[in-house]
Image (spheres, rainbow, N blue to C red):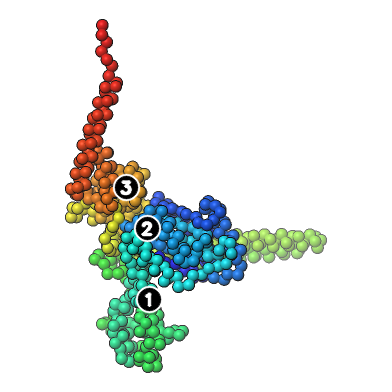
Amino acid sequence: MIAKIIPIKSVRKSNYSALIQYLTNPQDKSERISQIKVSNCYSDDQTAALIEIQNTQEMNKRAKSDKTCHLVLSFPEGERLSHADLNKIEERFCDALGFTGHQRFSVVHDDTNNLHMHIAINKIHPKNLTIHNPYYDYKKVAKLCEQIEQEYGLTKVNHETVSDKASRVAQEIEARTGVESLLGWIKRECLDELKQSGNWQDLHQVLVRHGLQIKERGNGFVLVANNGVAVKASSVDRSLSKGSLIQRLGAFIPGEHSAQSSRPDTKQYQPRPLQNRIDTSELYARYQQEQSDSARQRTNQWVMLRHTRDQLIDRAKREAKLKRNLIKSIKAGRLAKKALYATAHQQFKTTIAVIKGDYQKAYQHSKTSHFRMGWLDWLAKEAKNGNAEALAVLRSRRVGQFKGNQITTKQSNAGFSTDGHFKDSLVESITKIGTVTYQAGSTTIRDDGKRLIVLPDTSREALIDILQVAMKKYGSHLAINGTESFRFEIAEVAAQNQMHVTFDDKRLEQYRQQLMKQYKVSKAQSAERIRSTTSTPRRIL
């Protein structure tokens, strides 16, 4: 599992109410939120608890740092724990970080392949009204993660907090965006050559061959690509920090920007999708073109909006000036004129406020309509609109083996198509690894292209719908994987509802056939009892 404290870059942006509003927003998804839990408040009612936490934070006037700790616990794909276990784990993390007795909201999100819990903790103690900022929290969190992985049998994740931080930063950036980062590109393309450089001239030559420059900025060095993208040298590797390079190569000697950077054999960094078994060049070119067009339209709209706003303000000023001149020209007493001037000024202020308010609304609408979309978000949008190629690219990003409850087939090519048998269904969302969530009747289906994913504690009525979808997609011969209780429950549902389905597992199939015989015998006996009780005896004359 992964536990991470999300930092707030600006105290001004620390808004507990806004955070809770985001966490508890279902976003038109039927299964985004599986649990909302309030701790250490007088009331379990969400609205009352939120007001209580906000009042507690307001009562501390001395604290200048962020008063909210946003902790996220994320579990490996397919590994899901019960709500009781999640609540125990949440309490252990809060105790380890020193937040025992602090007020908090805990929200479990189940709309992605990775079950995750958001914990919004009020750093202000409800009784002492003092703020608690945990020190070395990353070490405590890493140690507790290892313990929980061992206790609950979860997949072990590297929780090393010091070594090779740059690699983890690059991996996190690239995993979130799906686009190769400059930091990752430098590590893969020329880091070894940079480390082997014996003097500044050799270092500059290596950089020039890769379209890079090293520059002083602040108290350190940055590596700048030809397209203007820059990254801290020490973030790439500690051996490239200013202190390390000066100690190894001597005093810094700036490089001369030579014509070598324009040579055809010079490598250039360009943001592009990570290497994939599917060619994404056409899709990425279309994505870049759409983002460029959207940015241009947004800029043009903003220019028009500002121009319209300024015109309306100028007209309001002229009208206000005309009113003042009219008031000045009329014959009235001093107090009467003063009242008229005040009324005209108030009308002017109201008009300006309306103009600026309308401008802000139009500006926000334009910003929302033409916001810059990430590569993976764009692919998900395209996939939701029926683009099979975009869906295939998302699904090709999946790595590792899925361990959760699933229904699939053992046939060689089944389940890998992106023909979109769910096109006629209501698609709720598509994740960044291509898991489609859609409705089948009243049941939410999760389909990642290779299998149907079944969540724990799924009702038997929902299992019937899921089995029917699986039969439409894979045929009547299915493979059931997951926990033993889930597999037997699927067999029981199939037998009880007389579904024409078979299972690839011989033991499970025998169990299903045995249940079918039992159900048939039980049904026949019930029918016989009904006939015997409803039949009328023959009248003897």
Q: Amino acid at mark 1?
A: Val
Q: Residue at x 31, y 51 (%)?
A: 454
User: In terms of image quadrants, where is residue 253?
Assistant: bottom left
Q: Residue furthest top?
A: 541
User: In terms of image quadrants, where is residue 287?
Assistant: bottom left
Q: CA distance from mark 2 to mark 3?
A: 27 Å
Residue placed most toward the observer, 58 or 312: 58
Q: CA distance from mark 1 to mark 2?
A: 27 Å
**Mark 3 = which residue?**
424
**Mark 2 = which residue?**
115
Judge from the rendering whether residue 27 lies leftward or rightward of residue 384; answer left or right: right
Q: Residue furthest bottom?
A: 250
Residue 444 visible to the viewer: no
> Can you tell which mark lies on residue 162?
1
Q: Residue at x 52, y 61 (%)?
A: 102
Q: Earlier in the sequence, mark 3 or mark 1?
A: 1
Q: Nearer the viewer, mark 2 or mark 3?
A: 2
Q: Amino acid at mark 3?
A: Asp
Q: Earlier in the sequence, mark 1 or mark 2?
A: 2
Q: Amino acid at mark 2?
A: Leu
- Which quadrant does the N terminus fall into? bottom left
- Disc 2 residue crowd, few under 14, some 14–19, many 20+, Cα 10 Å: many
Residue placed most toward the observer, 79 or 257: 79
Q: Secondary structure at mark 3?
A: loop
